Amino acid sequence: MFSDLKIKKIEPSYLQEACYLLEIELPEENLKKMASVFPLKSSTESGTQNKLQFHFCSYLVDALPQDVAYQFLQSMTFFHVKKGERIITQGETGDNFYLILKGTCFLTQEKNDMLFEIDQRGPGDILGEMALFGEELRSTHVYAETDTDLLSMGKEQFETLSHEYPDLRNFLSEVIARQLSTSKVMDDRKIGKYMVTERIANGGAGLIFKGSHTLLNMPVAIKMLKHEMAMNQDFLGAFRNEANIIAQLNHPGIIKVYDIEELYQTVFIIMEYLDGVPLKNLLKNMKLSLSKIVDFTIQICFGLEYAHKKGIIHQDINPQNIFILSDGQVKLFDFGLACFRGCVNTNFLFPGTLSYISPEQIRGDPVDERTDIYSLGITVYEMITGRVPFAGNDIGALLNVHLKENIPDIHSTMEDIPEELHTLVRKATQKEPSARYQNVSEILGEIQPLSEKLRVRTQPGFGRQDKMIGMFLVYQEEQELALKRFIEELSKHVKETGAVLRITKFED
């Protein structure tokens, strides 16, 4: 094994975007030994063959800003391992991880005195990654399947570097995301009692996975807070706050939270899986009919009305946080900025999405139901016109118009809009909260005549039908007491979801 060589030079690869050309300069005493293994590049100054070059691409490093990627790679140490050599030994301690520059490796695991090959990894992949998360005992053997070139770094060095470059922490997120969505070892894909099946979305603060309950085979969505945020106490507190707030809500118009898990130095929220698209996507691809606008507005209002009665203010109502299921049902989600009525947000300069933000949020005043009503008014405006009333890249100018300017009159561009919707948008977006609707129930009263005219039903969760799962439990008499306790516990958990467990005994 040749080791302890540093990268001399890094530059963007001319062959492929998001890849790098790495150059390693060899000390004079290693030239003869290295020349028997590598094709060396001549130095322009001396004509001596003393340089190694590698074209390196990695999905893990691609997640980092280029300047951070440079610092990260330049801080790593180069290793060359011959075919058949063991790189990592199962059961031993170790705090180093490796990136593969060239070659392939295979992973094996010893169980009951038998050896099982469980995975193969190649250029751009990582080895020994669990050392980054404090798991020092190696869980597998790793062998070089071919002559292999590696870059290595220790956990302590990574932590030191990530304090200097916080964006580097997202490398951890990519490592875990890769493991959860692609590992061939089923235990590597578990988050508590949930099994991850695929990665489905990437947001600013979190990654979303699809998964299922390992016992109930129930589909779930799993939201993981990115490590850069998880190591920031303000963001971590907000993420936990989101889970705790939604867990208190049980309404057909609000996404359900089933569980929260803390693992791999971050937090996971396990939620119901939604089959559909955000309203924002819908607005990009189609013009909504009048009946759809009224339908969606009413459903949003029912969800908000329920949350507000619980004292919870969403603080970020906008089409990206409103999900439309395939059957047309609306769900509110992303309660990451939610707080209780009267709160003043001190963790974020401008909470909420700027095109929908209320004047009181900009001023840093206490928020209440009328804050969500302002954002709802702008959302309805966008559903009607297909665009937001205020837009632009100048943040100062955008905030200023929210504070001082009325939104454009929709009658000026769309004369056939019903007066009920025109009034709703105008009144909901007044600059002073006292001039707006004081609660969502007033909006529902305002829009009811129009909904009746359009024959849009106005009951929360309309169109939902009760579903039933049948299950037979076959047991012996001596098992009855233990099963009774289990069923009582199960019934309690079922009740927490809003469902009902009914039991019928059958006699042989």
Image: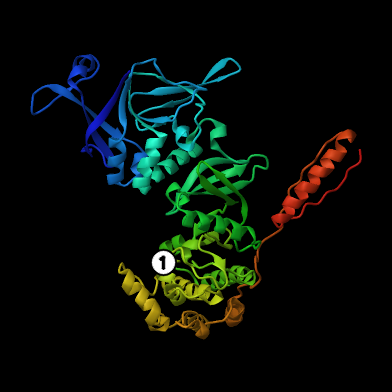
Q: Which residue is mark 1?
A: 349
Task: Report the front residue among 234 and 307.
Answer: 234
Helix, strand or loop at label 1? It is: loop
Residue type indicated by callout 1: Leu
Quarter of the figure with residue 46:
top left
Q: Residues within 10 Å of mark 1 (few under 14, many from 20)?
A: few
Determine the image quadrant of residue 404. Answer: bottom left
Residue drawn 76% across the image and 46% down it:
470
Res 376 visible: yes
Q: Please provide percent x and percent y for residue 109.
A: 52, 22
Instruction: State the scheme by which the image is colored.
Output: rainbow
**In this picture, residue 280 sits left or right of residue 458:** left
Q: Position of residue 251 (x, y in %)?
A: 65, 63
Question: Residue 412: x, y in percent?
Answer: 38, 83
On screen, residue 419 above or below 97: below
Residue in the image at 45% along x and 66% along y:
351
Image quarter hosting the N terminus: top left
- Which of 303/435 is in front? 435
> Residue 89 placed where, x, y %?
47, 20
Q: How many marks?
A: 1
Is 233 drawn above or below residue 287 in the view shown? above
| Residue at the right extreme of this rendering | 507
Quadrant in the picture for residue 281: bottom left
Q: Is 340 placed left or right of 133 in the picture?
A: right
Quarter of the C terminus within the rendering:
top right
